[in-house]
Structure formats: structure tokens, C-alpha cells
Image: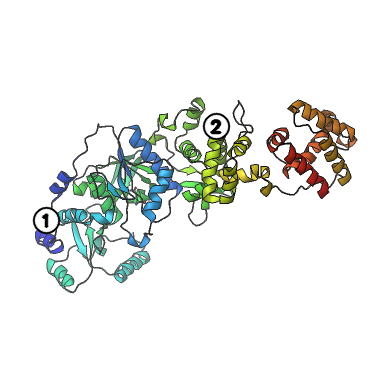
């Protein structure tokens, strides 16, 4: 076969050479241990936790080593593309603190190794396609969809491996005349790799996460370019990561089965193989068994979910770090206020089998993060959240900032701060009663007579003095308790509950329900101090009237 003639026949318009490409995208001038890596998502409009796991891993590896993190948009599959998806992607990653040094941006590209959107790189791939044809390592295939499905059926019936290989690779050795004839008929073709691998051969390969792998050579003539001239993931991966001078490829382990082909392809193209960091999947418990998080079944896979629930970004970040590096939690305990970037991240510590995503653990981490913030910060973050997700509440918060900050300051600071909130969404159920608009009508326990509750509330009104300190206030509550024949001796009550009509806890609950509409609230004395004398009295009076 005259490969030169074939290369000219298939790519007459390609005049540039691989050497031209090497000159256009020179080797980066970085120290040897600097990690040059990328995120290479497909713009499907769906940004998920897996993207974040991969993104944080690449970001840490790049920036910790004073290397480069760039964003490449893998838009070769036009069918899966959704309008506006690149914006969603960039904004979401930015929201989670993943900042790129170069690559695709909302307004275009930034950096010397672009274009960073693969469809715009077609001419670059064609240079290497032509090179492979010239060297006898690629050829066109005119098989139709029907022919390929027939092939598959045959392989299934014969219990053979699937794919275009051996006797099934029917276009592998066709003459240039046959090829010309099909082209003249206007038949579409794909470009296939001519594999020289054999499944009889195995070799060892070291993945940074998975460790030593035994790889079986690829014997399939995989597609390099689709019939529209756009590359498959495999070909684009090899060409782009070589020319963009990627040193480490961090990606999901769903790509592991393609690794034999990638290793083969890099070699055929004369490229140095990058290091691979194959990340295991995120799983969750489903009953007693683990399964991969699924886009269809698990809303918590989408990153938009965490924003809408109101998880602070730093909480999600902290949680993901605890998942990725098991020593992160200990480090955090020893360095409670250090920036997380001080932690020495290691891809080698990633669990090769993937990680179990634990929503409750995330909530705990988040409670800690929110507990660390001061009231002013909580206020501004809550306003930011409610402005997007609950504008009515946002209005109330903004109408009296001082009041809101006082509420949010309850139990904050000190050695043991309260950990009421895991998300900003929980703020309204937690503190809404401070706003008359969200105050729920009091509902008292039925086992106590209404007259008795009324009596307690009236006594409270008579005794309530706004100037009382916490102790005096509580002594008054205790006095009322004893007046109505309930006990303040909780020990005695616990020893024999039947000996008492009720306790000081019951009395406090009457007051709490009357004042807050709830059986649970932060410290009631503090609540009354924030509500003020008038509003507290008014609420108690309304409760009396409702009985
Ligand atoms: N576009 C591929 C994906 O979204 C990228 C994999 C990679 O990082 O190489 O899975």
C-alpha cells in the first residue's frame, strides 16, 4: 500500500506537520516536579460530585506543586451538548473554589495552548491523523452501522470478544482503489487505528491511585476520527494532553478499560505517556449494599443540589477532602483554622476502590463549619443564600440587620458553640419564629389541662420583668412551678415520675410554646431578651387567648 497516496487522498488539505505543532505548543518551562494537569469535562449541563472530586484532586496536585491547572472543554459529542453548559460548568467550579490558570473561560480562551474547546481543534487532530496514515498506523473504514451490528451479533453468537479486530477488521487491508471507489460514491468513513497489539501479551503499569496494574494489550482497531472528522475521546486525549503538555491525567476510573489503548496510542504517536490518576467512583449505601451514585436516582449527585440546600462551599470542600485523604481529618483537628491549602494532599492516599458518600457526615462537617463562623459572616452568607432561594425571608433579614445578627449570635463563639445549622435552608425553621410572619400558633401537650397552662402563662406575665438577669428569670419560672404543684427536683422526678403532676421542664415548655410556637428553641431567656418585652408579652397573651 502506498501510504503517502492514501494520506493525500484522505487529508489533502492538511499541510502542517507534527513538527509544526511541536513548535506551536512548546514544552512548558516548569521544574520537573510541577504538575501540569487539567479538567476535561464534557459540557452536558450536569455538574456532579464526581467532577468536584476530580477537580479538587487536579487543583491540589497542580497548585501544590506550583504547576498549572487548565480547563479543556471536551465537546466532541455534539449530541450530548446542552446550550449554556460551559457557563454552568465554569461558574459551578468557580463557586467551589476551583480556579483555572488557563483554558476555556466564559468569554473565550485564555492561555497559549488553545483552542481549549476540542471541536475548534479539528485541524490539529488531522495533522496527527495524516501522520498515522503515512506511517501505516491508521486507515479508513467504510462499514455501515448495520454491518457493525451484524458483526456484533456474530461475535455474541460465537462467544467471541467484541470489537473491530482480526477477521472482523474488514477494511484493514483494503486496496487504495477500493477506498477511492467508496469515496467517489460519497460514502462516509471513520479513521481507525491499526492495532498491532495482541491479547496474549500483558505488561505492568503503575497508576498513581490504583497501584500496579496488569494490562492486556489492545488488539482492537479503535476509531480515531468519526465520520464528521471529529476525534473520539481517545484520539483527542492523546493529541491534546501531549500538546498541552499535561504531566498528570486525573480522571474517573470508568476510563481504565481504555488505558491499554491509550498507552498504545501515545506510543504510536511518539508521545511521552503522562502519569494517570484513576479515581474510583462515589458510592452510597442502599439498604445493606453499596452502589454507585446515580444521576437518575440520587439528587445529591448534582452540585446544584448543595447550593440549593445551602451547604456552605467550605463545608463541601472540607468533606470532599476528608473523603480523598484519610489523614485530612486528623490534620484539621490539629490545625483548626489553617487554610485547607496548607494540607499536604497526596493522590496516593485516594482509595482505589472509590469512596462511600455519607450525607450525614457532610451535615456534621457543615455544622462544624457554620459553628466556626461569626454572626456577621453567618448573616451575610444567609442573606446571599436567601436572596437566591427565599426572597421573602431575605427581605425580613435585611429589614433589620441588627436584630438578625443578634439572633444568629445565640450560642456562637466560646468553647462549645451551638451547632444548630448544617445548611442555610435550615435557618428558617430554626429562627423563623423570631419573625411574626413565621410564628406558628402554639400547640400545647394535651395531657395538661388548658386551665393549668393558662394559669402558668398568667403567672409568668405577672412576674416577667425585662430587667431580670438569667438567674432571676429562671428562679421565677421555678417559683411558678412550685406554686402549681409541679416539681423542680428533677432527680426526685426521675426516681418516681408518678409522684408528680409535672416538672419545671413542662412549665418551661408551656412558656417556650407560647413564645416561640415550638417545643425546641435556643435558650428561652435569651429569646425573650431579643424579642423584647412588648413582643414577648403579646405572644404570651395571644397564647392565653388561644386556649
Ligand atoms: N471528557 C472526559 C469525561 O468527562 C474526560 C476524561 C478525562 O479527564 O480525560 O469523562
Label 2: how many Cα within 10 Å (few below 14, some 14–19, many 20+): some
Q: Nearer the viewer, residue 467 or 95?
A: 467
Label 1: how many Cα within 10 Å (few below 14, some 14–19, many 20+): few
Residue 231 at least partly seen: yes
Q: Which mark is residue 15?
A: 1
Mark closer to the chain start, 1 or 2: 1
Q: Quadrant of residue 527?
A: top right
Query: Does mark 1 have its CB less than 8 Å from ligand 1?
Result: no
Q: Residue at x 19, y 60 (%)?
A: 139
Task: Give the quarter of the figure containing the N terminus.
Answer: bottom left
User: Furthest-bottom residue in view?
Assistant: 185
Q: Nearer the viewer, residue 146 or 300?
A: 300
> Residue 150 in the image: x percent, y percent?
32, 70
> Residue 338 in the image: x percent, y percent?
46, 28
Quickly name the residue at label 2.
372
Q: In screen coordinates, is 286 left or right of 223?
A: right
539 over 33 or under it: above or below: below
194 over 476 or under it: above or below: below
> Residue 285 in the image: x percent, y percent?
55, 47
Q: Residue at x 31, y 60 (%)?
A: 163
- Distance from disc 1 to disc 2, alpha carbons, whole Å, reads 61 Å
Q: Nearer the viewer, residue 312 or 160?
A: 312
* For discs 1 and 2, the disc positioned in front in the rendered view: 2
Q: Which mark is residue 135?
A: none
Q: Secondary structure at mark 2?
A: helix
Q: How is the image coloured?
A: rainbow
> Residue 266 in the image: x percent, y percent?
23, 47
**Residues at circles 1 and 2 in contact by the CB criterion of under 8 Å:** no
Q: Nearer the viewer, residue 110 or 126?
A: 110
Q: Residue at x 34, y 35 (%)?
A: 63
Amino acid at each position: 500500500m502506498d501510504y503517502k497516496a492514501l494520506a493525500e487522498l484522505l487529508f489533502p488539505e492538511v499541510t502542517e506537520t507534527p513538527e509544526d505543532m511541536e513548535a506551536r505548543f512548546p514544552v512548558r518551562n516548569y521544574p520537573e516536579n510541577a504538575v501540569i494537569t487539567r479538567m476535561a469535562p464534557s459540557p452536558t449541563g450536569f455538574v456532579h460530585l464526581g467532577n468536584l472530586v476530580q477537580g479538587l484532586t487536579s487543583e491540589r496536585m497542580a497548585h501544590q506543586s506550583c504547576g498549572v491547572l487548565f480547563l479543556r472543554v471536551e465537546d466532541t459529542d455534539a449530541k450530548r451538548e446542552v446550550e449554556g453548559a460551559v457557563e454552568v460548568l465554569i461558574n459551578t467550579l468557580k463557586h467551589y473554589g476551583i480556579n483555572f490558570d488557563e483554558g476555556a473561560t466564559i468569554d473565550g480562551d485564555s492561555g497559549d495552548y488553545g483552542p481549549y474547546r476540542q471541536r475548534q481543534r479539528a485541524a490539529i487532530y488531522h495533522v496527527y491523523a495524516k501522520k498515522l496514515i503515512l506511517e501505516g498506523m491508521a486507515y479508513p473504514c467504510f462499514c455501515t452501522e448495520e454491518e457493525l451490528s451484524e458483526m456484533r451479533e456474530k461475535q455474541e453468537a460465537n462467544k467471541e470478544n467484541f470489537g473491530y479486530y482480526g477477521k472482523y477488521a474488514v477494511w484493514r487491508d483494503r486496496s487504495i482503489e477500493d477506498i477511492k471507489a467508496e469515496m467517489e460514491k460519497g460514502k462516509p468513513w471513520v479513521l481507525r487505528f491499526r492495532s498491532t497489539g495482541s491479547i496474549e501479551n500483558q505488561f505492568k503499569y503503575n497508576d498513581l491511585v490504583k497501584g500496579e496494574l496488569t494490562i492486556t494489550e489492545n488488539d482492537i482497531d479503535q476509531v480515531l476520527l468519526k465520520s464528521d472528522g471529529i476525534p473520539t475521546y481517545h484520539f483527542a486525549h492523546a493529541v491534546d494532553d501531549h500538546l498541552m503538555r499535561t504531566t498528570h491525567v486525573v480522571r474517573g476510573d470508568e476510563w481504565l478499560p481504555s488505558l491499554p489503548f491509550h498507552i498504545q496510542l501515545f506510543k504510536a504517536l511518539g508521545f511521552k505517556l503522562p502519569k494517570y490518576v484513576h479515581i474510583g467512583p462515589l458510592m452510597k449505601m442502599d439498604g445493606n449494599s453499596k452502589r454507585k451514585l446515580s444521576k437518575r436516582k440520587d439528587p445529591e449527585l448534582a452540585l446544584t443540589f448543595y447550593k440549593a440546600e445551602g451547604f456552605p462551599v467550605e463545608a463541601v470542600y472540607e468533606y470532599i477532602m476528608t473523603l480523598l485523604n484519610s489523614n485530612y481529618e486528623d490534620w484539621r483537628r490539629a490545625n483548626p483554622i489553617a487554610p485547607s491549602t496548607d494540607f499536604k494532599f497526596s493522590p496516593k492516599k485516594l482509595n482505589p476502590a472509590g469512596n462511600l458518600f455519607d450525607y450525614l457526615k457532610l451535615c456534621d462537617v457543615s455544622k462544624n463549619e457554620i459553628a466556626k463562623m461569626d454572626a456577621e459572616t453567618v448573616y451575610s452568607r444567609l442573606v446571599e443564600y436567601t436572596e437566591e432561594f427565599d426572597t421573602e425571608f431575605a427581605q425580613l433579614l435585611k429589614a433589620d440587620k441588627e436584630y438578625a445578627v443578634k439572633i444568629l449570635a445565640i450560642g456562637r463563639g466560646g468553647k462549645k458553640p451551638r451547632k444548630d445549622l448544617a445548611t442555610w435552608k435550615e435557618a428558617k425553621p430554626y429562627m423563623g419564629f423570631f419573625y411574626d410572619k413565621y410564628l406558628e400558633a402554639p400547640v400545647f401537650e394535651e395531657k395538661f389541662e388548658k386551665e393549668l397552662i393558662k394559669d402558668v402563662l398568667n403567672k409568668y406575665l405577672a412576674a416577667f420583668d425585662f430587667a431580670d438577669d438569667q438567674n432571676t428569670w429562671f428562679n421565677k419560672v421555678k417559683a411558678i412551678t412550685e406554686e402549681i404543684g409541679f416539681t423542680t427536683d428533677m432527680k426526685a422526678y426521675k426516681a418516681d415520675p408518678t409522684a408528680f403532676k409535672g416538672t419545671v421542664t413542662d412549665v418551661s415548655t408551656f412558656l417556650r410554646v407560647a413564645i416561640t410556637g415550638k417545643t425546641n428553641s435556643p435558650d428561652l431567656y435569651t429569646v425573650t431578651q431579643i424579642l423584647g418585652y412588648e413582643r414577648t408579652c403579646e405572644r404570651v397573651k395571644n397564647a392565653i387567648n388561644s386556649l
